[in-house]
Image (cartoon, rainbow, N blue to C red):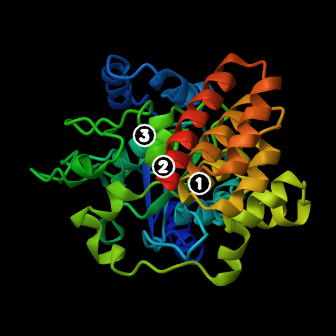
Amino acid sequence: MENLDILKAELIERGKHLGFPVIGITDARPFDLWCQAVEVRRTMDSKVERVLSRLTPYPEDLMPDARAIVVAVHPYLPYPEEFPEGVPRYSAHYVEYPGARKAVEELARVIGQRGYKVMVEPPLPAKAAAYRAGVGTFGKNGLIYVGEYGSWVTLHLILTDAPLSCDSQSQDLCLCGECNRCIQACPAHAIADDGAVLPGRCLRAYMLSSEFVPVDIREKLGTRLLGCDICQMVCHRNSRITRQARLPEDDHLRPFDVYALIKALVENDRKSIEAVASLIGSNYARPQRLLSSAIIVAGNFGQPKFVPLLIKTLKHPHPPIRAYSAWALGKIGGRESMNALADALKDETDERVIQEIKRAQEIAGLSECRSDA
C-alpha cells in the first residue's frame, strides 16, 4: 500500500471514531454542475445571488495547489415536529453542527501531520462536493442523501494539497423518481418542480434574519425558531431515521422557552444567552437576530403573557424588531396591546414600522370587536 493509500485509510478509520462513518474524496476541479444550477436559479429567484455569494466553485481560488477535497459525513437523529408547550421548534442540525465542526478540525490533523496543507470548512458548495465524492445523491429538496442515514446529516469539507485518490460519484443524480412529497409539503412553495430550492421563499432563509421578514412568511414560520425540516420529515427516503426522532434533553429545551428567552434578551441576561449559544453556536445566537425570531414565535403562539415583554421590545432600536413586536401585539390583541400600539405610533419615525403598527391596530381592533360581540 502506497503512503497516500495508507493516509486515506487512516483518514477513514479516524473519521469513524470522530463521528464520520462515511468519508468520500473528490478532486479539486471547479464545480461546473453547481455553476450550471446557479445559472438556472438566477432566473427563478432574485435572492439566490446573496445566498450563494459566500461560496466559490473554484477550489484553486482558496488553495492554488489544491489536489483533493475530503467530504466527511456526520449523521444525527432529528427532533420530532411537536415540541413541549412554550418551546419553539429548532432543528437538531444546528445542535449537531458545532460539535462536528470541531471534530473535522481534528480529522484534518491526520493530513496536516503528514506535512500537507489543509483548509477546514472552505467556502465551497458542500452538497456538490459530497455528490462528486460519491457519498450520496440529491433529493428533490436539494439536500444530499447518504445511504442509510438519508438527509439527516451535516457535511464537512477539508481542502488539501495532498494528492489523495478520489472516489467515484454516483451515476444517478437523484433517486426520488416520481415522488413529489417534499414539493407538495413545503409551506412556502420554495421547491420548484425540478428540485431547485429557492432561497427567496425558503423559510429557513428568513430565520434569524436582520432584515424585514414579510408578514406571510412570519405566519408560515409558525412556532419554528431555527430550521425547517418539513421536506425531510415527509420524505420516504428518510423514514427509517425519522421514525427514531426524539426530543432534546430537558437541559437543552429549557434555554429555548420562548418567554424566558425573550425576557433574557430584553434584560441582556448573558448567562441565559450563553446557554443558547452553547447549544447552537454563537453565530446563530446573536442577540438581535435571536430576539427577532423569538418575537415572531411569540406572535404565533398568541398568548397574552407575552404582551408586557412585547411592549418593551416595541421600543427596541432595531426597526424590524419594533415591526415584529407590533405585529405580534396585533395578533394577540387585547386592551393592553391596543394602548401600547397607540402610544408607539405617536413616536415612531420609520415608515415601515408605522405601517406595521397600523396593520396591527386593525387586526387587534377586529379581535376586540369579536370578543365584545
Furthest residue toward left: 178
The residue beneath circle 1 is: 297
Q: Identify the image quadrant of the N terminus.
A: bottom left
Give residue 91's position: percent from left, percent from top.
52, 62
Q: Nearer the viewer, residue 33 or 83?
A: 83
Give the left or right position of residue 129, taking residue 86 as reference: left
**Secondary structure under the numbered disc 2 in the rendered image:** helix
Q: Amino acid at mark 2?
A: Leu
Q: Residue at x 70, y 58 (%)?
A: 306
Q: CA distance from mark 3 to mark 2?
A: 10 Å
Name the element at disc 3: loop
The image shows residue 207 at horizontal and vertical percentages of: 57, 44
The answer to whether residue 282 is visible is: no
Residue marked by disc 2: 221
Amino acid carrying mark 1 in the image: Val
Q: How many residues crowd mark 3 within 10 Å: few (<14), some (14–19), many (20+)?
A: some
Identify residue for label 3: 202
